[in-house]
Image: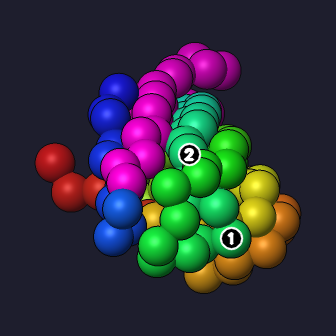
């Protein structure tokens, strides 16, 4: 869990993030990691507004343990606005796949 504080010239806007990392499933080989973020940000991303608008992001990542290699698939959806780590400013749903290497 984390609390975010976003600022513009005239106001502060709060956000809340929560995630559970690597929930083990299927004999501890499949790992599921859900994440959710809700926030209030400056309306129309204005630097001078005092009005806020609600935004959110949902992310679900599934990975499979193959020794040190973890292939994964991830889906992420967000509302319009700025979200850290996401390049899209409009509503968006993204799908990504890849490999991660975990060294103990």
- Quadrant (top left/top right/bottom left/bottom right) for the N terminus: top left
Q: Position of residue 89 (x, y in %)?
A: 69, 77
From this viewpoint, is residue 18 visible?
yes
Q: Bounds of the magenta span?
A: 11-30
Classed neighbour count for the residue bearing mark 2: other residues with Cα under 10 Å, few (<14), some (14–19), many (≥20) = many
| Rendered position, 100 above or below 36 | below
Quadrant hosting residue 38: top right
The residue where tag 2 is placed is 40
Viewer-proximal residue among 79 and 86? 79
Q: Secondary structure at mark 1?
A: helix
Residue ID at (36%, 62%): 10
Q: Is residue 94 left or right of residue 44?
A: right
Residue with the mark numbered 1: 44
Q: Main secondary structure of the magenta part?
A: strand
The answer to whether residue 27 is magenta is yes
Residue 100 in the image: state x and y as whole percent. Answer: 44, 65
């Amino acid at each position: 869990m984390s609390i975010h504080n976003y600022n513009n010239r005239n106001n502060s806007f709060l956000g809340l993030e929560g995630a559970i990392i690597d929930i083990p499933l299927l004999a501890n080989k499949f790992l599921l990691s859900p994440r959710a973020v809700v926030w209030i940000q400056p309306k129309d991303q204005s630097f001078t507004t005092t009005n806020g608008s609600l935004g959110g992001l949902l992310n679900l990542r599934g990975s499979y343990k193959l020794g040190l290699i973890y292939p994964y698939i991830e889906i992420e959806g967000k509302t319009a606005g700025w979200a850290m780590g996401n390049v899209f400013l409009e509503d968006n749903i993204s799908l990504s796949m890849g490999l991660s290497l975990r060294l103990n």
